[in-house]
Image (spheres, rainbow, N blue to C red):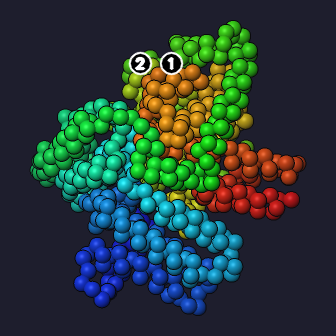
Amino acid sequence: MNTSIRSFVTVIVLSYVVFLMGCTTETPSPLSSQKAASQKAASEKASAAVDASQDERLNAFFEQIFERDIANSPNRQTFLGLKTDRQGEWTDISDDYASQQLAIRKADLAVLTSDFDYPTLSEESQLSYDIFKFNLEQSIENAQFRRHFYVVDQFRGQFTGPLSLLQNNHKIDTQQDAIDYISRIQGLEGLMNEMVKQSKDREAFGVIVPKFAFQAMIADITSIIEQSPLKDDFSQKVSQLDISDDEKNALINQANEAIEGAFKRGYRALLNEVTRLSKVQDKTQGVWALPDGEKFYQNRIRHHTNLELSAEHIHDFGQADVERIHQEMREIMQKVEFEGSLQDFFAFVRNDPNNFYPNNDAGREAFLDDARNETAEIFKVAPQFFKRLPKAELDVRRVEPWRENSTSIAFYNRPSMDGSRPGIYYANLADMTGVQKYVFKAITFHEGVPGHHFQLAMAQELKGVPNFRRFGGGSAYVEGWALYAEKLAKEMGFYTDPLHDFGRLQNELWRSVRLVTDTGIHAKKWTREQTIEYFVKNTPLSEQDIVTEVERYFVNPGQALGYKMGMEKILELRGKAQSELESKFDIREFHDAVLSKGPMPLPILAEQIGRYIAASK
């Protein structure tokens, strides 16, 4: 572990010890003691140095909370590339722990609003204050609906995520790392049992995942049990250790025993629960059917768009935008001299052999080569559009076969804190007949550069800002930027082939259709079949992709709204800047204004761009 990470971890661990030293008038349980101490520590940290400036006190408060939250999350520590004495544990997912965290968040908000004089803060600290307060308030509101979320589903990776963390993030550089890995394998039994417990609780509350989700979940859990994907990963990592063969074999045997024992017991328990529920659930409905479903969906809209918008408004906007994009597509049809209707052109795109890679390993490698080449090319022209570029490298990888059934078409993992792990753009290449060349050019720009990799890696590399801003998120900003990046790539000289530009429009259309279908499912009571039919009629996506998308919206309400609404806000702000600055407008400066402060809620981004415009006149 390098010195900077070691010192950072030391701060985390020492801070965590301080939390546990808090006292109370009762005899508390360890968890309640931790909760009370965490609340007390947050307040004491904020007011510790009475002679310090407001800015220094506020930043100390933010850092203490950031360190506390990381100390409480072994998963996040590993994801960030940190090694602590909790490396062998899993983050607590219990309802009791969630309740304790809610109390802590409320205490944090009380300290923030009572202990700091907002008008005396610097502009930078006011920005941090605004972002932190917005996120805290949203988190507290979200907690009201904890029992509305599905404990496990076919999309969000609740039972595949831990395996991915072990494979992709848990490094084995020492024997202790290997022992911690084994401890986590053993801990998966408890993690799966907790999911089973919560599943039964949600069932009693009236929340069961839609009927369609069970087939994929049962297939994935069965595959995990049969393939035991951690065996090869552990063996390969341990084989690189500088220890004797006997010591390596002993570790491998311990891991295999844990896999055959606790690991499989845990996943079998989850499989039994999912199989049982599959015989109970006979409906596929949006969240409108859940207790207080309308309020829950409005919460999801606020969370994912940061805006006070009604489902009706989003639905209507989506329909209008679908028509706009259809018209741009018709213009491309004329360029390529295609005769027929737009639906005919959709069918042509779906079936054009030039639009697909061979459905074999050679085709998969060809895709990866193309994506890596596109990435290299866009890096060359990026300085014309950006003042700064991320230092972290970007790798393009195939989604591992064992989790292909439960992941989306493509996604991005940010780099580790210490730079030892690059940013990773994952593509799901299970079935190459569903991988359209015209579309994946835009997806590469979305997931890689100038999309997620530029935004997330650059945020992580920011200096002089609180860590919660470096590692923050929010789908409206993050996904809005990535969708904007797809369009920006055209300005950067890509999509010279009209069919590739059609693929870009297809991606944007896909996100606009999401506005219609997500609100259709959860506010207008659309059926799965009705939603698929709308998708087929209005987009050239393959049937496989459409089904995956629609089923995703059912189990993750509102998440799909952030992409398009975020993009629209960025385009709106860019248009405002261009209109007001005229010849003084510089695209590099605008992008820096959007990215240089890290992710933030859209209303706060609008304020920031307003300041940038005023300063540039």
Residue 216 place in picture, x, y as percent? 32, 32
Residue 275 percent across, percent down from the top left: 22, 37
Packing grade of label 1 (10 A; few <14, some 14-19, many >=20) is some
* Residue located 61% across and 57% down the image: 601
Q: Secondary structure at mark 2?
A: loop
Q: Residues within 10 Å of mark 2 (few under 14, many from 20)?
A: some
- Mark 2 = which residue? 359
Q: Is the residue 219 above or below the residue 567 in the image?
A: above
Q: Is residue 160 above or below residue 69?
A: above
Cβ–Cβ below 8 Å for labels 2 and 1? yes
Helix, strand or loop for disc 1: loop
Q: Quadrant of residue 68?
A: bottom left
Closest to the observer, 46 or 31: 31
Q: CA distance from mark 2 to mark 1?
A: 8 Å
User: 614 and 548: which one is in front?
Assistant: 548
Whole-percent x, y for residue 606 in the image: 71, 57
Locate the N terminus and report the quarter of the image it occupies.
bottom left
* Residue depicted at 39% across the width and 68% down the height: 101
Horizontal arrangement in the rendering, residue 89 relative to residue 477 (left or right): left
Residue at horizontal 19 percent and vertical 41 percent from the top: 272
Q: Does 428 sit above or below residue 523?
A: above
Q: Is residue 456 left or right of residue 596?
A: left
Between residues 493 and 603, which one lies in front from this camera angle? 603
Q: Which residue is mark 1?
A: 356
Residue drawn at x 21%, y 55% as measured from the top left: 190
In the rendered structure, the answer to whether residue 254 lies left or right of residue 181 reads left
Name which residue type carries label 1.
Answer: Phe
Q: Answer yes or no: is residue 259 visible.
A: no
